[in-house]
Image (tube, rainbow, N blue to C red):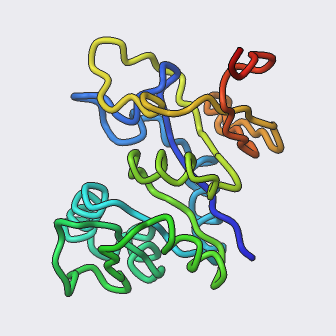
């Protein structure tokens, strides 16, 4: 069976984005951008929620055939939504309106999966024990005043086993983990 990787880019204080800041906080250096292109070429299906689908398909409509967008358009994508209606306009995109947990279990039999954004979808998949890898690229900014979408709010407690690290452009830090969802803090008794 294939695996599911949750993939996030975050500020040091855990935000997915910040009001008024450019994409990638204006820090997408050449080494990181080259790695993104290499990483995008690895075989996988992209999983998205409705909100991320609307955002990303809008970027594609604006940017068209730019290298990163063209490869994402060519890649198979699955959108989980109870509000969107098919057929979806973004090429190679399948809409699933049913239970995402069951669908992901089936999709993992077909090949590797990765998420883009989709915070609530990722949270649900992690709680259900379906996330095999958790990868975070930390950008060296704190968005205390302008940050939007705190990534880890509402998450269960999770132990993370570090399996890879990397530094890009002397400032961006990649951390890849194997996650284990915990019932509570380590060593806490369950009941009395």
Residue 118 higher or lower than 174, as above or below: below
Q: Position of residue 145 (x, y in %)?
A: 28, 12
Residue lying at 20% horizontally and 71% vertically, measured from the top left: 61
Closest to the observer, 138 or 94 = 94
Label tally: 0
Q: Which image quadrant: the C terminus?
A: top right
Q: Position of residue 151 (x, y in %)?
A: 44, 34
Residue 172 higher or lower than 86, as above or below: above
Residue 130 higher or lower than 127, as above or below: below
**Whether residue 176 is visible:** no
Q: On the picture, is 100 further left or further right than 112?
A: left
Residue 71 higher or lower than 177, as above or below: below
Q: On the picture, is 98 further left or further right than 152?
A: left
Q: Quadrant of residue 181?
A: top right
Residue lying at 69% horizontally and 52% vertically, measured from the top left: 133
Q: On the picture, is 161 further left or further right than 35?
A: right
Q: Position of residue 57 (x, y in %)?
A: 25, 67
**Whether residue 101 is visible:** yes
Q: On the picture, is 48 further left or further right than 54?
A: right
In the image as oriented, which residue stretches furthest toward the front?
Answer: 192
Q: Position of residue 174 (x, y in %)?
A: 67, 39
Q: Which image quadrant: the N terminus?
A: bottom right
Closest to the observer, 93 or 104 = 104
Q: Quadrant of residue 55?
A: bottom left
Residue lying at 19% horizontally and 83% vertically, measured from the top left: 86
Residue lying at 18% horizontally and 71% vertically, measured from the top left: 84
Closest to the observer, 191 or 74 = 191
């Amino acid at each position: 069976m294939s695996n599911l990787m949750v993939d996030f880019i975050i500020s040091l204080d855990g935000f997915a984005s910040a009001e008024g800041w450019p994409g990638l906080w204006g820090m997408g250096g050449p080494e990181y951008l080259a790695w993104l292109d290499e990483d995008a070429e690895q075989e996988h299906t992209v999983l998205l929620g409705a909100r991320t689908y609307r955002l990303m398909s809008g970027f594609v409509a604006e940017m068209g055939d730019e290298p990163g967008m063209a490869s994402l358009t060519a890649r198979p994508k699955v959108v989980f939504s109870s509000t969107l209606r098919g057929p979806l306009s973004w090429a190679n995109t399948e809409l699933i309106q049913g239970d995402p947990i069951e669908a992901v279990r089936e999709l993992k039999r077909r090949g590797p999966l990765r998420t883009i954004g989709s915070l609530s979808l990722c949270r649900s998949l992690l709680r259900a024990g379906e996330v095999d890898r958790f990868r975070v690229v930390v950008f060296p900014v704190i968005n205390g005043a302008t940050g939007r979408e705190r990534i880890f709010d509402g998450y269960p407690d999770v132990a993370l086993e570090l399996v890879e690290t990397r530094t890009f452009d002397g400032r961006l830090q990649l951390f890849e983990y194997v996650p284990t969802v915990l019932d509570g803090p380590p060593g806490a008794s369950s009941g009395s």
